[in-house]
Image (spheres, grey):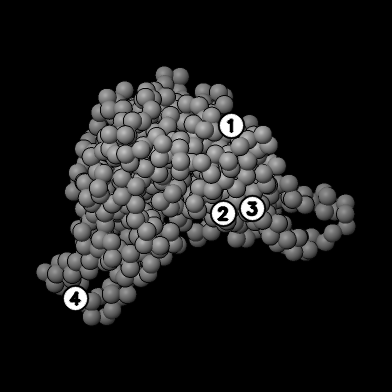
Amino acid sequence: MIKENFIKIYENSFKENWELPALTDYSKNQTFTFEQVAAEIARLHILFKECQVKPGDKIALVGKDSVRWCIVYMAVMTYGAVIVPILQDFNPNDIHHIINHSESVLLFVSDRIWDSLDEDKIKDLRGIFSLTDYRCVHQRDGQHIQKIMLSLDKKFNDKYPKGFTPNDIKYADVSNGKVVLLNYTSGTTGFSKGVMLTGNNLAGNVTYAHTLGLLYRGDRELCFLPLAHAYSCAFNFLVPMSVGTHVYMLDKVPSPKILLKAFKEIKPNLILTVPLIMEKIYKKMILPQLNKRTIKLALNLPLLDTRIYAQIRKKLVEAFGGEFREVIVGGVAMNQEVTDFLYKIKFPFTIGYGMTECGPLISYDNCREYVPGSCGQPLKGIMEVRIDSNDPYNEVGEIQVRGENVMKGYYKNTEATKSAFTDDGWLHTGDLGTLDNDNHIFIRGRSKTIILSASGQNIYPEEIESKLNSLPFVMESLVVEKNGKLVGLVYPDYDTVDHTGISHSDLLVIMEQNRKELNKLLAPFEAVHQIQLYPNEFEKTPKKSIKRYLYNNY
């Protein structure tokens, strides 16, 4: 058990960093100090109490990254309730399902997403609040939340007649063994897994980060990855808020042009990113220089190549703001060409490894100790890793982990929880890898079927296939990644095709229509780019599941 109490970390941080800037909506240029964030949290605590929210109750949160998103998240946990962050790109039906499955009693939602939801499908919610200004946009029959909202300012002033001060901060006594976060790995019924993360799991991530010397009081960080993901939430929000770092929410599509402008203005001290962004910057900034004829010739000359690489590194560091300690890349393996080049020019980057079920961090090395091809060493004193093979140094096997960061289990899913662990208590990661003599982890492949989108969102092909298989004339299907886009391989239901008298030559037209209908049911990042007909049934295991690995390169 981590000795530092997770909730108390923030109680102390708000007191110690009272006057410092905490959160900024970059596009609005609106900043909240730690004092203002703490006061907003106090107001929400009064609201929760008036709405009869009990410790351990769930409160759902869905919307784009913003200061108010962060305030709600922190207010729920410091009250003693359980936060349920939902990815804003989920289909409305998936959002309905997660809200109901989690048994959430309140919902905070962006106005855009609220317009797409149906309150009749989430009837158990007592109240729904806008993330724009916290107004109550819907209340269940018999509730008096809108009346409560009218008197909230008075109740706040009555409780703090001399003004809200650091001495007024006293957060819930929640032991580290209690669940504080339900993080859903998907939305669809039948595939939902609400990862139960305890205060101890999150404290393991946060306190380990404190030992790394990456963020300090008064530092700056730019958040451009979705906070509903464990990776971004932990290191773009929870860690910075625990040490007094100022976080800017980008609130824009993180194109290289937009990012580089923001880096120049904010000059962040730590950068968290995903491979796609690094790869795009490499292609737009570096490759054009390397492809110049004079540079190509110069790189073949001893000493001159070193100077050129040093100059490229200097420009790249300046492009990222010039004041960062390192760039941490996570989510998926980076293109080898890009990785090799960044390492060659001594650019300060590293690649970590984790999963939602570990809140998320499993392994990490700082940029000075980064070993090319690896994703770091298990967190010392926090996590242990083993390889399920006879020779973990040479023979690929499943990466299995245990330690302080490992989840309590899946919410209301004892079967999935049981299957997630080995008989002796190690968590299956579903990833394949090896170790070296210094315990660096080398991922060699994925036994899981998860596909990671370009910007780092998890895509679960079984969910898409389940929907695709229900469309006309589809016997079975496989969703694979091809050149960065999703392709649906379909073996048609030829018996039905023949029975209805449809020509086989018309199948492509039918499947294109199926694709359009399918994409209406999916989040934008899950959209299928193309459907290809497959001539035979897919090969199966004895359990009749498709041998996916045979089709990865189709």
Whether residue 304 is situated above or below residue 122 in the rendered picture: below
Give the mark toward the camera: 2 or 1.
2
What secondary structure is found at the residue carrying circle 4?
helix
> Which residue is denoted by mark 2 in the rendering?
111
**Distance (Cα) linking label 3 and label 4:** 57 Å
Q: Residue at x 56, y 54 (%)?
A: 111
Vertical arrangement, residue 218 with respect to residue 27, above or below: above
The residue where tag 1 is placed is 103
Going from N to C along the chain, the mark reached first, 2 or 1, is 1
Q: Label 1: few (<14), some or many (≥20) within 10 Å?
A: some
Task: Name which residue type carries label 1.
Answer: Glu
Give the quarter of the image for residue 138: top right
Amino acid type, label 3: Ser
Sequence-first disc among 4 and 1? 1
Q: Nearer the viewer, mark 4 or mark 2?
A: 2
Callout 3: helix, strand or loop? helix
Of marks 4 and 1, the one in the foreground: 1
- The Cα atoms of the two marked residues, 2 and 1, are separated by 22 Å
Front-lying residue, 528 or 381: 381
Q: Give the residue number, with chain letter if any, for mark 3.
A: 116
Residue at the spot x=23%, y=51% of the render?
219
Q: Earlier in the sequence, mark 4 or mark 2?
A: 2
- Residue tagged 4: 298
What's the distance in space between the residues labelled 4 and 2, CA to CA?
A: 55 Å
